Amino acid sequence: MKKLSIVLLFIICISTLILGTMEWKQKTNSSSIPAASKKVGSKAVSTIDSDALVNYAANWPQPALDGFSKSLKTKKPFVILLAGSPALGKEEGWASSVSKNLKETYESAVVVETREYDMTSSEFLSQNKADELASLKPDMTILEPLTLKDNGIVRIEESHSNIDAIREKLQEANPGSTLILQPPNPLFDASYYPFQVEALKKYATENNIPYIDHWAAWPEMKNEELKEYIEEDGSLPSSEGHKLWAQYLTDYLISK
């Protein structure tokens, strides 16, 4: 009887030791998975850190930042629209680079749309292109308002009226929408064009429209170095110009 009790006690001790070891391994394996991800099958699925994303958007206009915070809570993607003239550069331009950077940083929290138009702002309206932009219902639009295409064709006052009309269309489609203006690229040794861009900046200020002054990053317009950032025909950014422009906008849209 005494031997039997010893055997039973030995079995109980061994069982307790085995169960304890298994529980310790289970806890160790669980704690080894990073808090920022979880395992689904063989893949790690990242979870979005809302606070971190809001911090990245610190430079955005307050209405856009508020809208983005709300979209994170409702899990509805925040739509960012990049629109303007051929200065966007299609697949190899600044818009493509900025779009890629936004998607890499904000992941599924944002949807980025790009639209390019080779026409004046008056043609843009007459061909109902403003309705096309509005149909996307963007939450934030960064618009290069065809300023260079208007140069010498559309009067400055009319250009600004056209922006008013575009802004109205965007707000009708999405009352919480934010419009941001920016100029196209600078031109070497231009004469009238700088006044046109300065008028755009003044218009934005007077109408409380955020303005991204990326010209601050380019060489001065009379500096020969500027030619390195503009294509040989002198009107659109070169690959180096697109890189410079993309970096400026990326720094604005993604605060790190």
Image: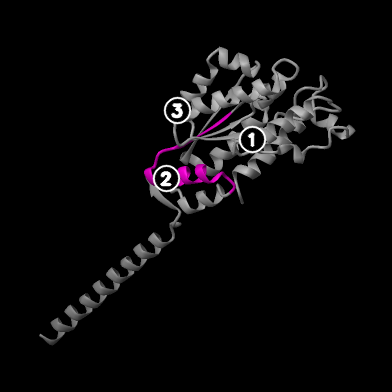
10 Å neighbourhood of mark 2: few (<14), some, or many (≥20)? few
Exactly how many numbered labels are in the figure? Answer: 3
Q: Is residue 238 visible?
A: no
* Distance (Cα) linking label 1 and label 2: 26 Å
Residue 88 is a magenta residue = no
Residue sticking out furthest to the left: 1
What is the C-alpha distance between the residues marked 1 and 3? 20 Å
Magenta stretch in the rendered image: 59-82
Which callout, 1 or 2, points at the residue further toward the start of the chain?
Answer: 2
Residue shown at 24% from the left, 77% from the top: 13
Is there a contact, CB below 8 Å, between mark 1 and mark 3?
no
| Quadrant in the picture for residue 32 | bottom left
Q: Residues within 10 Å of mark 3 (few under 14, many from 20)?
A: few
Mark with earlier residue (2, 3): 2
The spot of residue 206 in percent (x, y) is 63, 37
SS class, disc 1: helix
- Residue type for callout 1: Ala
Choose the circle earlier in sequence order: 1 or 3: 3
Q: Is residue 160 above or below residue 30?
A: above
**In the drawing, what numbered circle is on residue 70?**
2
Q: Is residue 67 visible to the viewer in this orientation of the structure?
A: yes
Element type at mark 3: helix
Image height of 30 relative to 16, above or below: above
Dot 1 crowding, Cα within 10 Å, few <14, some 14–19, many 20+: some
In the image, what residue occupies the spot 87% across and 34% down? Answer: 225
Q: Which disc number belongs to residue 204? A: 1
Q: Residue 103, percent across and down? A: 54, 38
Residue type, numbered disc 2: Lys
Per the image, the residue denoted by label 3 is 172
Q: CA distance from mark 2 to mark 3?
A: 20 Å
